[in-house]
């Protein structure tokens, strides 16, 4: 059974089409209009082994906020829809990823309750053409859209590019772990019987 979702969002601020295949090979075709954001999403798909096609037409004449936040909403929704009833998945994921000076921890729970924790101020206001404050907005939107408990901690780091890249790759690796199957799990991994 293919764990795939196609999600669209059409507002006065953004028009988004996103196709996500959870059981992929790490292929991506991404165009959000924000070059550094495209680079980060490509790293997420490559290291999570997801296949994703994403097209975003946003109001970049204002700034990148709506583009980034709404893409997070759509990606989170796609993750939730692609997972379906979540039968047999491990549910929890944890990864600590090094990238040069950066060391990032990402831990998540696909238990159906959104919560997001990220307390970090980047050393620079921008990386490429993207405001660093938008990383928090993106992952908060993903957490809400996916109904995911998501914690991101920057343990070490001096270079904003390395830190951001480590965050996206760690998120991909942690999500890949959480959605993987364990043949010992019958139904869903919850004492409640639902996720």
Image: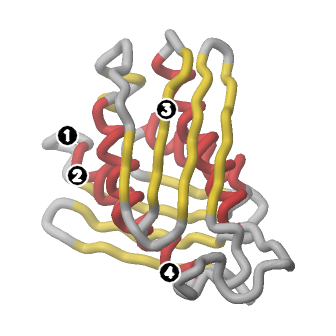
Residue sticking out furthest to the front: 191
Calculate the distance from the C-alpha at mark 3 to the C-alpha at mark 2.
24 Å
Dividing the image into 4 quarters, which one contains the N terminus? bottom right
Provide residue 26's location: percent of width, then percent of height: 73, 56
Question: Going from the N terminus, do you reach mark 3 or mark 1 first?
Answer: 1
* Element type at mark 2: helix
Task: Determine which residue is flagged by label 3.
Answer: 153
Q: Quadrant of residue 170?
A: top right
Calculate the distance from the C-alpha at mark 3 to the C-alpha at mark 4.
27 Å
Provide residue 154's location: percent of width, then percent of height: 50, 26
Calculate the distance from the C-alpha at mark 2 to the C-alpha at mark 1.
8 Å
For marks 3 and 2, give the one nearer the viewer: 3
Task: Determine which residue is flagged by label 4.
Answer: 81
Task: Determine which residue is flagged by label 2.
Answer: 66
Question: Going from the N terminus, do you reach mark 3 or mark 2 first?
Answer: 2
Q: Along the line of sight, which residue is nearer the eye, 7 or 111?
A: 111
Query: Total of numbered circles in the picture?
Result: 4
* Element type at mark 1: loop
Provide residue 51's location: percent of width, then percent of height: 66, 64
Task: Determine which residue is flagged by label 1.
Answer: 63
For marks 3 and 4, give the one nearer the viewer: 3
Q: Residues within 10 Å of mark 2 (few under 14, many from 20)?
A: some
Q: Is residue 10 above or below residue 62?
A: below
| Residue pictured at 45% horizontal, 73% vertical | 112
* Element type at mark 4: helix
Q: Residues within 10 Å of mark 4 (few under 14, many from 20)?
A: some
């Amino acid at each position: 059974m293919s764990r795939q979702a196609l999600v669209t969002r059409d507002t006065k601020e953004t028009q988004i089409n996103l196709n996500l295949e959870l059981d992929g090979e790490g292929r991506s075709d991404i165009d959000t209009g924000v070059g550094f954001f495209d680079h980060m999403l490509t790293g997420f798909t490559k290291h999570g082994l997801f296949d994703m096609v994403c097209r975003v037409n946003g109001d970049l004449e204002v700034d990148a906020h709506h583009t980034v936040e709404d893409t997070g909403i759509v990606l989170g929704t796609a993750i939730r829809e692609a997972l379906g009833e979540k039968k047999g998945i491990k549910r929890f994921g944890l990864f600590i990823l090094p990238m040069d000076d950066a060391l990032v921890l990402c831990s998540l729970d696909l238990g159906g309750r959104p919560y997001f924790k990220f307390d970090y101020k980047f050393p620079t206001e921008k990386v490429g053409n993207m405001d660093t404050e938008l990383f928090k907005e993106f992952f908060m939107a993903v957490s809400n859209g996916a109904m995911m408990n998501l914690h991101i901690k920057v343990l070490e780091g001096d270079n904003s590019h390395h830190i951001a890249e480590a965050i996206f790759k760690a998120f991909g690796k942690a999500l890949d772990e959480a959605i993987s199957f364990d043949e010992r799990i019958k139904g869903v991994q919850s004492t409640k019987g639902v996720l």
